[in-house]
Image (cartoon, coloured by chain):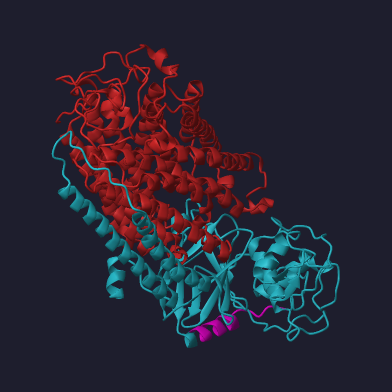
Amino acid sequence: MSPSLATTPPAPPAEPVYNPRNYLNAEAGIASWLLTRDHKRIGIMYFVGTTMAFALGGLFAMLIRIELLTPGPTIMSAMSYNRMFTLHGVVMIFIFMIPAIPGIFGNFLLPIMVGARDVAFPKLNLLSFYLWAAGAIIALYGMIHGGADTGWTFYTPYSTTTVTKVVPILLGAFVIGFSSILTGLNFIVTTHTLRAPGISWMKMPLFVWSIYATSVIQILATPVLGITLLLVAFEHAFGWGVFDPALGGDPILFQHMFWFYSHPAVYIMVLPAMAVISEVIQAAARKNIFGYRAVAFSSLGIAFVGFFTWGHHMFTSGQSTLDAGVFGVLSMFVGIFTAIKVFNWTATLYKGAVRFTTPFAYFLGFMFFLVFGGMTGIALATVSLDVHWQDTYFVVAHFHFIMVGGVIMAWLAAIHYWWPKMFGRLYSEGWGLVSAVLIILGFNATFIPQFLLGNSGMPRRYYSYPERFWPLNVASTAGASLLAFGFAIIAIYLAISLKWGKVAGPNPWGSRGYEWGTLSPPPPENFLEQPVFDRPPHDYSEELPGMEVTHAT
Amino acid sequence: MNEFMRKLLFLPEEGSAYAAEVDRLHFFVITVTMISATMVALATLYFFVKYKRKSETQATPRVEPKAIHEILFIGVPLGFFLLWFAIGFPLFVKLQNPPKDAMDVYVQAKKWMWKFSYPGGPNGTDVLRVPAGRPVRLLITSRDVIHSFFVPDLRLKQDAVPGRYAQTWFTASRPGRHQVLCAEYCGIGHSAMLAEVVAMDPVSFDAWLAEARRSSVPSAQDWPGEGADPRATLPEQGRRLAAEYGCFKCHTVDGTRHIGPTWLDLYRKSEKLEDGSTVIADEAYLTESIMDPAARIVAGYQNNMPTFQGRIPAPEIAAIVEFIKTLRTDAVHPEPSKGPVYVPVTGYDPTRASR
């Protein structure tokens, strides 16, 4: 009996065992966390940090929805409202969504999945985290001292002439950009140089493929954002005339530069979500992915074509008709790569052995939001339809479906799927399913009315609105409170699980992803001895007695 | 059927012929989306029921896709996507290219109001009156930050960008009122920056326009440099402004070649550029040549015009461009002292003057 995925788990014990010497307890004290170079501990620090950012961004979202409960002023002034949606966007995008999945799960899992001891540059990895934290603190400083009222898109010349504190927020996002670049660099080098013997490119877990594609975008696109944000900050502070036409600048130039990063940034957020889903679906279906190459290469395809679609944000800006056409067609191709993944994930269930678990519930939610978010994206890329929808709630609903819905579903799927690996304990599956249902329903109740609001012509970033938009706004706010309730439940049962959860054992899912071959929680070295990877990941083609530790929850 | 879909999707009324065409494509896209999403959902449900897990150590066969699977996965959606694009893009091209007989209205956005100027008068804010059934071209700009002119009923939207003109057009199907909203975030008054398009039957519109022009005081012969008269029509203001800004030091209005190209018959003229390409001297090119003269120099002229970016506000550029448009051989008296023969009537509401 030779274990094939990895060598560490011994013969299955009768009761699952909590690995006594693990990365969590190998060293003690605050300093051992703050100065750690262990990718797993850095992942946990991102977990804590980004979750706090998510709570803050969620609070802003709730305040926005409460303000929109009535057509006129409800709980705040127009100026406060404008700050709220700006901060909601900045916190959720730059401080939560971009770093969340790569920061938490990329850090925690990527080295384990390629059989490495750590990432290629562990000190740089810690620096990435501190850059993220520094950027978040600078932005937070700006929020406390007045906030900005520009929207997260910082469109010029509004952003260069506003009296609010836009500069600290720009600088915060600028610093976070460096964190993003260094993390991407680390993952690329790790993937190229630290793969264990036996893990060829075509045997890499799909998670690694997708994170790799993300990293490529991060290091190529983020510098452009950095340049753009700095130019806006300098123009705001010193009156440089790059973007303001009153000073001889060009505001449309800003839009080109901004979206050159910020469109690929959508894939920086969504590709890691797709990375998670590819793993979760194989484990839930107990089957290898339907088209490995198609899924792997479509990630690279998205990363590549994603660079040539930015102009679809500017169909009504007055860019040339030809440009609009070219950007429209290219946007269709990004849709195709996503469609390939959707069909392959669905086909993975074929002849599988499917079990309905909390991660699987989030997989279903993810597919729902991806399909409708994606198809509405195609509709928006159909140039003439965009004219009506541009800058309305339809666009808001669209990107909340595909980007936020996609990322949140995958983030929750990842938390629930890898929680036993990260902390060695199980959570309540019943409460897991209840909150999954609440969140998926709440998300739909929040954003389906927003699609309809967009159709009926309500522009985004509206503090007050004509009364005909009232009923749908009430529906949306009701949905948002359901959503908040769902997240509160998750926070409670996960906190309980940390201390009192049942011991999970190395592999409660019976998964054959590489990372499940080590103990839970993993030892600081990841594997106790050099693991052997003689099968592709998620190969369930034969029963391997002694390989899996299963147990009902 | 279309009416049912429109109500189901909360779409506003279709106030232009263009709106109906856009909605038809919208319904096509949404129907295919719903059908395909249902098919994916049914497939998932079927697989889930059929392939439920029986034991926790159950082995599953390795299924490798055939090439035909992946080709279908790519080909079928791509076919639909490109079909939609093939319908949608020509529609967009139509929206970008106003018919030649369209009536012009200048639209100027500022925090937080919309100003509408008819070339022969009048000027006004908040209400844009148009004749139903006749094409109207809007020349849109902003005097401060970016705004966006959005009329849901017409399925029409165009950003108002400071420093440049953008054009769009529509034909209102029938008399009626349509709300105008600002769609590009522009500060605390963003959601209050509302206006109205009032489509009138053409006969009433003509009567209104004539009345509006007649009832205002006819402007004097305000020649270049004779001071501001806010009651002047756009071309009249343009002539005065051009003199104030010193345009006539280099440009003539009588066809004589001087330091810069003459303005006579300049509008819509095909100009040969230094690099050999040609450009039609439309509103966009004229605006650009004032804002950024070095961008595209007409062949045979020196690059010595200063930029007026930031020195001439958007509405004044509109006036100058409108003045240039009136300088036609068939409309201009040869002697510069007499100037253009122009209907000397203006529509003007003194309470709504912006200058």
Q: Position of residue A443 (x, y in %)?
A: 28, 47
Image height of A389 relative to A344, above or below? below
**Nearer-the-camera pick, A233 or A487:** A487
Side of A150 relative to A3 (left or right): right
| Quarter of the image that includes the N terminus of chain B | bottom left
Residue A372 in view:
yes
Chain letter matching colour red? A
| Quarter of the image that includes the C terminus of chain B | bottom right
Occupied quadrant, residue A230: top right
The reply to whether the magenta stretch includes residue A126 is no
**Nearer-the-camera pick, B209 or A288:** A288
**Nearer-the-camera pick, A468 or A23:** A23
Q: Position of residue B314 (x, y in %)?
A: 64, 62
Q: Which residues are magenta?
A: B205-220
Occupied quadrant, residue A529: top left
Residue A63 in view:
no
Q: Position of residue B238 (x, y in %)?
A: 70, 71
Image height of B182 relative to B173, above or below? above
At horizontal 59% and vertical 67% (from top left) the residue drawn is B353
At horizontal 43% and vertical 22% (from top left) the residue drawn is A118
Chain letter matching colour cyan? B
Side of A201 relative to A527 (left or right): right
Toward the bottom, the furthest residue is B203
At horizontal 27% and vertical 67% (from top left) the residue drawn is B8
Q: Position of residue A83 (x, y in %)?
A: 45, 43
Q: How many marks?
A: 0
What secondary structure is the magenta-colored segment mainly? helix
**Nearer-the-camera pick, A208 or A101:** A208
Image height of A423 relative to A318, above or below? above
